[in-house]
Amino acid sequence: GAGVSQSPSNKVTEKGKDVELRCDPISGHTALYWYRQSLGQGLEFLIYFQGNSAPDKSGLPSDRFSAERTGGSVSTLTIQRTQQEDSAVYLCASSPLRFLTGVGELFFGEGSRLTVL
Amino acid sequence: DAKTTQPPSMDCAEGRAANLPCNHSTISGNEYVYWYRQIHSQGPQYIIHGLKNNETNEMASLIITEDRKSSTLILPHATLRDTAVYYCIVSVNDYKLSFGAGTTVTVRA
């Protein structure tokens, strides 16, 4: 498709299990972002990948969270030993190479809704 | 990044202009003003951004005051599909965007 694709759209897991969430960005976009949105809350920045540069992981809430981006395209967000407070919608976004201003438009996917029982 | 203040909700009549205010009194000189919206159960959608000058695109207009301490997003002819949460964000970087509670806009027929 033409947009950012995320899977699964819904995931229910038991506390303590590991989960993987996948993001397929728009073809040609060099930047990829992960955000999460808890129920009724705004979006919280998690991690940012730009080309071959080291990712900005400053938003990851704990060491149970990790993300990788293989081949500069698909990204996987992994949550180990899930807790109930991890329940949220995890949103992925991508953007093209920014211009001189370094400012661009983020294109968001529909999100993966994670429920930890 | 500077904080923003938006009204929690507002109603608008279909076909009329919707004017969404945002205060960002602590904005610094190199921070941009961004507007995104989020329709229920969807990911956020970029609307417009600006630094100092007013901006217009096919979706909306952005009016930034001369002192840059506030801005207004204008949807010229609101439709029912414009019902959404609208986020005003100020940021130096466009990836560490801090989405607050936003303004819930309800367009009524």
Image (cartoon, coloured by chain):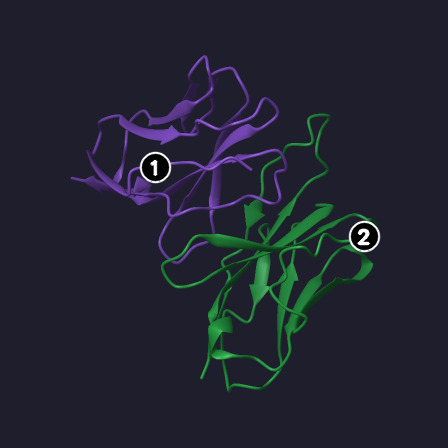
Q: Amino acid at mark 2?
A: Ala
Asked which secondary structure carries label 2, the reply is loop
Position of B29 relative to A93 (above/below): above
Is B41 on the left or on the right of A87, as rendered?
left
**Label 1 crowd bin: few (<14), some (14–19), many (20+), radius 10 Å:** some
The tally of labels here is 2
Q: Which mark is residue A54?
A: 2
Residue drawn at (37%, 49%) of the image:
B39
Given the current orientation, which residue lies at the most extreme front position? B26
Residue A106 quadrant: top right
User: Would you call the spot at circle 2 few (<14 residues within 10 Å), some (14-19), or many (20 or more)?
Assistant: few
- Residue that label 1 marks: B6
The kind of residue tagged 1 is: Gln
Chain identifier, purple in the render = B
**Looking at the image, which is closer to me, B13 or A101?**
A101
Place of residue A109 in the rendered image (x, y in percent of width and height, measured from the top left):
54, 55
In the rendered image, which quarter contains the C terminus of chain B?
top left
